[in-house]
């Protein structure tokens, strides 16, 4: 994917034009955010080991280009089989299983609301 002279991998991560492999995509996979729209799976986003900034920004490891998602919406830290979700700004609505949160440990099957979008968290 090449836009306006910049290079992106197929997941939308910004890459140096000289890179052949995306450094984010080769980090070990530890889970997924499954986006649901009208009760159906619309897209699956990979969660990798370590830091996963979630948002619209091209520096985000989990790049979600949806209207109600902020540039830096949330952060998922994945380490030692544990997953922590942290809201990134006062404008970012982040809910887990229907409760407003600023920071929480995620478990497999949690329902996450980011802005107006619904995701199910799946761990490996
Ligand atoms: Zn990538």
Image: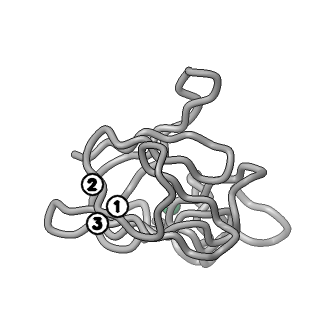
Q: Residue at x 62, y 59 (%)?
A: 93
Q: Is residue 56 above or below residue 120?
A: below
Q: How many residues crowd mark 1 within 10 Å: few (<14), some (14–19), many (20+)?
A: many
Where does residue 27 sit, x and y in percent of width and height? 32, 65
Q: Is mark 3 within 8 Å of ligand 1?
A: no
Q: Does the CB distance between marks 2 and 3 fall below 8 Å?
A: yes
Judge left or right: residue 81 versus residue 25: left
Query: Nearer the observer, disc 3 or disc 1?
Result: 3
Q: Is 109 on the left-hand or right-hand side of 57? A: left
In the image, farthest residue toward the right: 4
Judged left or right of residue 51, residue 78 is left
- The foreground one among 50 and 114 is 114
Is label 2 or label 3 in front?
A: 3
Q: What residue is drawn where x is 51% and y is 53%?
A: 95
**Badge 1 or badge 2: first in the primary sequence:** 2
Q: Quadrant of residue 63?
A: bottom right
Name the residue that disc number 1 marks: 48
Q: Quadrant of residue 60?
A: bottom right
Q: Is residue 13 above or below residue 30?
A: below
**Do the CB atoms of the residues marked 3 and 1 lie less than 8 Å apart?**
yes
Q: Are marks 1 and 2 in contact (CB under 8 Å)?
A: yes
Q: CA distance from mark 3 to mark 1?
A: 7 Å
- In this figure, which residue is indicated by the disc labeled 3? 78
Name the spot of residue 73 as percent of width and height, x first. 60, 67
Where does the C terminus fall, quadrant-wise?
top left
Q: Secondary structure at mark 1?
A: strand
Circle 2 is placed at which residue position?
Answer: 30
Q: Spot the residue most to the left.
A: 80
User: What secondary structure is marked by label 3?
Assistant: strand
Alpha-carbon distance for marks 1 and 2? 5 Å
Q: Which mark is residue 121?
A: none
Looking at the image, is mark 3 or mark 1 earlier in the sequence? 1
């Amino acid at each position: 994917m090449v836009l306006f002279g910049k290079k992106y991998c197929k997941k939308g991560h910004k890459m140096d034009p000289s890179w052949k492999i995306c450094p984010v995509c080769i980090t070990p996979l530890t889970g997924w955010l499954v986006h649901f729209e009208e009760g159906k799976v619309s897209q699956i986003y990979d969660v990798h080991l370590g830091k996963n900034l979630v948002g619209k920004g091209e520096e985000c490891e989990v790049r979600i280009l949806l209207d109600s998602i902020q540039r830096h919406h949330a952060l998922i830290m994945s380490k030692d089989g544990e997953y922590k979700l942290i809201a990134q700004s006062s404008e970012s609505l982040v809910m887990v299983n229907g409760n407003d949160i600023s920071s929480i440990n995620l478990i497999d099957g949690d329902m996450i609301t980011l802005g107006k979008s619904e995701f199910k968290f799946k761990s490996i």
